[in-house]
Image (cartoon, helix red, strand yellow):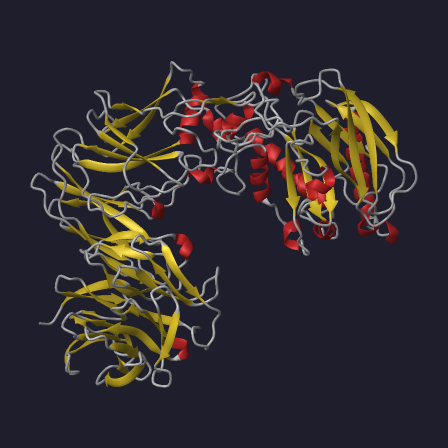
Amino acid sequence: MRLQYRLFRLLSSLVALLLSADASTARAQTPDRLPDIDVLYIERTPRYPGYQPDYDLPGRKGVPTLIDSRTRKPLTTAQAAAIKRQPAAGEKVTFTAHVQNRGAADAPPYECAWLIDGREIGHGMTTGLQPPGTEVTASVQWAWKPGRHTVRFIADPLFKVRDQSLHNNSREDATDAWTLIWAVDRVTYDSFNKLRNFLGTRSFEDWAQWHIDRMNHLFAISSSPVEQKDGWRPRVRCDRVVVVDNVEGAWDRVLGQGVAPLAAGYDGAWSFGRRPDCTEWAANADWGLIHEWGHQLGLTDEYALDRPGYLNEVADESGDPLLIAHKSSMAGYMMHGHGPTTFSPLCMAALISQRDRRRGFYGDYYFAIPARNVLRILDRTGKAVPGAKLTFWQDTDSAYHGKPIFSGMTDIRGNFQLPNLAAPEVTTDRGFTQHANPFGQINVVGPGDVYFIRIEGRGQTEYSWLDIAEMNLAWFRGRKDIKDVAVYTRRTRIPSPGAPKPPAHLSATTRQDNVTLSWNAVPAAVSYRVYTALPDEYQYRVSASLPASARTCTLKMTGGALHRFAVTAVDAQERESAMTRPAGAMRFLRPWGIAVRPDGKRYIRDAAYGQAVLQKPDGSTVGLVGSVHYHFEGSFDLALDKEGRLLSAKWGDGYDPNPGFRVQDRDLNLVVDYRKEEGSEPGRFRKPMGIAADSRGHIFVADSGNDRIQEFTPDGRFVQTIGAGDLFQPMKPAFDSRGRLYVADSTKNRVAIFERQPDDTWKLTGALSGRIKEPCYIAIDAQDRVFVSTNRVAGIYAYGPDGKQFWEYHGEPGKPLAGPRGLAFDGRGNLLIVDDALRTVWSVPLPK
């Protein structure tokens, strides 16, 4: 029968091509005026429930527990096993095919056929005409057989009806596929059915079913450490499509009040919300759908095992946050992103090992961890490192800081066995067992499931990660029982015994896209190797090999954010030393404001980045600090108040168009967020630029677009406007020891001076001018000397307390300033100059 259908399909296709080429074909027979017989989906009844675990039972928070829906008490193992979740062998089940005419003309009566495993089990014929947009159904019964079988429904199997599309006349599902129910907003549904999708039809179901087919294809080709003997792979199918006026609360209306899709017999559900114009949606594949349907099957977000650098506040040897990021060991696969890619080996192992198990548990395969877990440390030659010190930090809500959770030393074989932490013991129905393990109680959505590790040995300090997915894969690969051990190997850059000492005092200075490294000589060295770790990585690669005479190296930085550099020494026996302490360098893009902390470290505001740049006193860069979610991109200036809080003037951004200012505490947590719709009324801003605080902690913002300064209390309450009518494009406020307010009055080519009056208002009492042209920034030292950066003529001008200019600076011979902006004092007798054009920070000795 299958061969017969194929022959008829081929013959009919040839006939259709000949007919379409016939110029005498009547207008009524052109494709756009034909019916389109579309098999939408096949549903199966009866349905039996999936799992609905409760994660919030008192005393079992986060532990998946099956409960009695009436008593809310946990089910016993026997009670859970007694719930019928699949048809019994030999039970009569009914398959119902839903078929619509999605064309532009009535469909005449047509034949239809049912096939199981390619063999016909039923056939029939529709009666009467089927107008466009109408639906018919056809059903067949089958004695249920466990295991993998296929059910196929074909409308017009011999292609007797002249049809717009021959690609949607049939549908085939695996009988044991996990089932989805879809709810579709009526507006979205109607829009889809009016548009020609990328398959060439006008059918929401055709478009959505393509994603089902693609998901099944990905299941078929994705690699897995676990396989069934018969080669079984998971599949999904659509069991029902419901069109609703509003997808919010749709399941209560469709399935019954309080009835969830899992309880109604589906393995998952998805809602397609309202979108009046679906042109772009219909024309493209939506890979996010396949990702989200993966969640319906219980697969986790593997990107939840990523750790952004800004949340890694573990301190380095200098007390600065390491800011080292981690990418999940499952990066690059479907559940890590939304792209056209396969499912990860872990996802496939989890699904393949759960054959015939209904859906409902989420991520319980994270429980699959070997009983004993060993971290093995190897040196750069691949030999074991005994006596290496290992320190482990477990994240809290994906952040790392404070004391480590445990530490230890490697044994003579370079091994360290991770301790098992207590966890509630639970075995999910036909699933996995949580037992004591290195993470303790497992969080199946990611937090707490990644270790950050410091490795110290033979003068080398480096860092690594161990996430739960790596342990899960070890369990699946070996099916570890309580007697077995899983070993995770880390080959490090720890030197071999007898290697030379590393170079000392590595420093990094930047200018535009280049970084220049310098270091002290190592007597035993015959050469040096320079290593680079790109932004957000801690994976060093050799960038240069230099002779023993070298003391410096200039490299070009690519990409944005922090680059880390290190240097090693190599002796005549080709033994390589440990690395120097890393030196960081930032590829600035739009640097502007600067502020120096009491410890000499610097905050720099680069308008291209959403966080502040932290530099060490020697000018090397720690990295971007503070949460990315505060979105400081577009901000030009920052300052520190007397409490050490970080103040930032803020332009609008893509998340919030309103300008204003923000205040972060010493730990860079957001404590004041003053944002108002742009305007000229008191308390509103247009293009706020510079910011400063006086001795009382009051905040002053240069409201450049409104030609004024605005004053606020430390907690962000508006006080008053200053200088309206006197200022023209003010850029930066600053204060001297007497509390006088200095303002870089850009367009008037001066520094305006205001004094506070007895009634707490401010009065313009003087100005610094002379050779100043377009002042941008002001810094005032402890002697009340005023330093001003200027734009039109790139330079720095200094004025004494008497108001007279006593110094100016335009750079060094062959190295002129190009775009001086922010100014600050480093506490070591130097003036720091942020050069926006050269994208660097100059350090210049202050005049005596």
Question: Is residue 36 visible in this depiction of the protein?
Answer: yes
For image coordinates 37% across by 40% down, the residue present is 326
Q: Is residue 749 left or right of residue 207?
A: left
**Residue placed most toward the observer, 501 or 719:** 719
Residue 329, x across and y down, in percent: 41, 35
Q: Is residue 562 left or right of residue 110?
A: left
Residue 22, x across and y down, in percent: 84, 48
Residue 596, x across and y down, in percent: 22, 61
Number of marks drawn: 0
Q: Is residue 415 left or right of residue 651?
A: left
Q: Quadrant of the N terminus?
A: top right
Position of 294 relative to 757 (above/below): above
**Residue placed most toward the observer, 217 or 205:** 205
| Residue most extreme to the front | 759
Position of 346 relative to 749 (above/below): above
For image coordinates 61% across by 37% down, the residue present is 214
Q: Quadrant of residue 356?
A: top right
Q: Quadrant of the C terminus?
A: bottom left
**Residue placed most toward the observer, 448 or 241:** 448
For image coordinates 49% across by 69% down, the residue present is 677
Question: Is residue 156 visible in this depiction of the protein?
Answer: no
| Residue most extreme to the left | 523
Position of 669 relative to 806 (above/below): above
Q: Is residue 413 left or right of residue 719?
A: left
Residue 97, x across and y down, in percent: 78, 33
| Residue most extreme to the top | 483
Position of 226 relative to 138 (above/below): above
